Amino acid sequence: MNSYIEPLNEIYCKNANTDNAFWEKKYMRNQFEFFGIRTPIRAEFNKTFFKQYKLPVQNEIKNIVYELWNLPQREFQYFALDLLFKSEKIWDKNFIEIFENIIVQKSWWDTVDYIAARLIGDYFLKYPENILKYTEKWMNSQNIWLQRSALLFQLKYKKNTNFDLLTQYIIKLKESNEFFIQKAIGWILREYSKVEPEKVWRFASTVKLKPLSEREAKRIIQKKFPAIAIES
């Protein structure tokens, strides 16, 4: 085990809770093992850990992240995401390869959504010239988690959302029967509807989306901007 990870492993092992671990594993459909450390407690452990051990240097982060990703307990993957987020100032262009790799390994919404909205979203703000290169590749892949990431990386962009690009990707995936794709379409449109409700309503009403996607896209508009729905 990497020397940076050893003290973290000791902390997690010492504070493991088998009852919590059982229910957390069940909630994640028995896909992952858990220490059973609740999120607020784990956040405090991680905060103390980073304060004591600092961040590794840039050229060590990749190997540490991959080792964390290969460990069985899901808390190690969550720590890897914290580590990547905290090291944002030293990201170079090659960090997108780390994000891409961990999306397709041990894939589930709990890690993929954080990677897409927090890590990749920030990365593309830093290196916008890489947006099309990677998102088009992900869209053309057969991997639903890469496709979901291509939809969700703009989740926190608000007025800076490239709506033309987003709708282009939505149209390409709108016939998908995958729940996580339909949900992502509805989620990103719902989020953007907080900024441009008329634009989202018009799009969701004219492009034939799956019922789940359309329902999610229009939910906030119907609640907060009923006049838009009535007028249309």
Image (tube, rainbow, N blue to C red):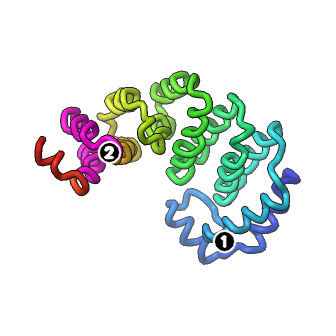
Q: Residue at x 25, y 55 (%)?
A: 224
Between 136 and 228, the residue placed more toward the observer is 228
Residue 115, disc: none
Three-letter residue code for mark 1: Ile
Q: Main secondary structure of the magenta part?
A: helix
Q: Where is residue 62 shown, x and y percent of the image? A: 76, 39
Name the quadrant containing residue 171: top left
Q: Quadrant of the C terminus?
A: top left
What residue did someone put label 1 on?
Answer: 41
Q: Residue at x 45, y 28 (%)?
A: 139
- Answer whether residue 222 is visible to the viewer in this image: yes
Residue 193, disc: 2
Name the quadrant containing residue 8: bottom right
Which of discs 2 and 1 lies nearer the camera? The answer is: 2
Three-letter residue code for mark 2: Ser
- SS for callout 2: loop
Magenta region: which residues? 195-221
Q: Where is residue 85 shown, x and y percent of the image? A: 66, 47
- Looking at the image, is 127 positioned above or below residue 229? above
